[in-house]
Amino acid sequence: MHKVITFGEILMRLSPPDNRKFSQAKNFEVIYGGGEFNVAASLSNYGIDTEFVTALPDIAIGDCALSATHEFQVGSKHIIRQGERLGIYFIETGNSIRPSKVVYDRRGSAISQIEKGVFNWEQILEGANWFHWSGVTPALSQATAEVCLEAIKMADKMGLGISTDLNYRSKLWQYGKAPHEVMPEMLQYSNVILGDIDTAMFMLGKDKVAPNYSNDEEIKTHFSELTDLLPKLNTIGMTFRDSVNASHQRIGGFLFKDDILYRAKNYEVQPVVDRVGTGDAFMGGFLYGLLEFGGDMKKTIDFATSACALKHSIFGDVNRVTKEEVLECMASDGSAKVNR
């Protein structure tokens, strides 16, 4: 039985309904989500035992965020209550040629004020076989970066698999450190990384590259360079996105392992209901495949890409599809006929 621990921030998302602009909003729809939580929720949906670790303010809004973990049957026994506020982000959902806009209001949130030693990572990770984190968490504050590194080192010491979604968010790195000053040490422990080649090299302080993603040999060369830089890295995943416009996306995926590149089939998604959380849906599907498919890398990347594509059709941060629905999508021609 697998058990996955994820660590990060859960936020309140506020969005104007019906693709309205902020200037038109008279009310906002409220949802709770965040990268690492979204991954845990996906895995829980697929039947994996999960536990989400974070800090929430001990106020009514913190209770609402905690209720979201219960809704998706994600473990919450190691969530601590401290601080005065929950992080917030506002999203104006794009449509057609108008892109989405995101405004963050996360400064001073409960998770950004945690301190080293507040979590007993040895106890938290006991009985688990996987730990997942993303590049969003060390971007929040020096404190969250230090606590995340604590968790990573303990997970490595205890022999857990460690995965990272690079998740670069330029608007979040505001506390005086750049990614290349923080991420290289943390990524040295990662066994699995999700992210494009440009972002990985940027976070490692290396020269950016502009790979031709239609050339398999070129992609393999760059992925091999990445595994040379990170000694514990054995598997790399990447989504491939061709954005025709905000309402029309072409979704594909790569998986690189043991010098072999696996490609998923591409999906045409039109119209897009909600793009937020689609990368987390891919990550959830990716981890599920690695844990459950017995080393079948082609099936793993197909499952992850299908989960990602399906998430574009679902409103909210969390991918609410079941394992069976993902498998059905993998086997279908994309026509989405009524299931009677």
Image (tube, grey):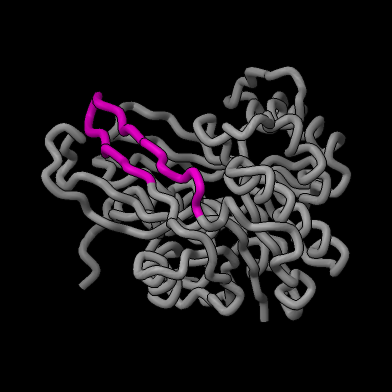
| Residue in front for this viewpoint, 95 or 157 | 157
Q: Position of residue 86 (x, y in %)?
A: 43, 56
> Does residue 183 sit above or below 17 in this rendering?
above
Residue drawn at point x = 82 percent, y = 50 percent:
189
**Left or right of 331: which side holds 197?**
right
Of 92 and 50, the residue lying toward us: 92
Q: Range of the magenta residues?
A: 89-109
Q: Position of residue 72 (x, y in %)?
A: 42, 73
User: Which image quarter holds the N terminus?
Assistant: bottom right
Q: Is residue 259 above or below residue 177?
A: below
Q: Residue furthest front?
A: 84
**Residue 6 falls in which quadrant of the image?**
bottom right
Q: Residue at x 17, y 47 (%)?
A: 17
Residue 282 among magenta residues = no
What count of labels does the image hold?
Answer: 0
Seen from the viewer's position, the closer of residues 118 and 228 is: 118
Image location (x, y in percent) of residue 77: 57, 79
Q: Residue at x 78, y 34 (%)?
A: 226
Quarter in which the C terminus is drawn: bottom left
Q: Percent position (x, y) of residue 47?
A: 52, 77
Q: Nearer the viewer, residue 54 or 256?
A: 54
Residue 251 appears in the rendering: yes
Q: Residue at x 65, y 50 (%)?
A: 144
Answer left or right for 146 relative to 293.
right
Q: Quadrant of residue 320?
A: bottom left
Is residue 304 something that shows in the picture? no
Magenta span includes 105: yes
Residue 248 in the image: above or below residue 40: above
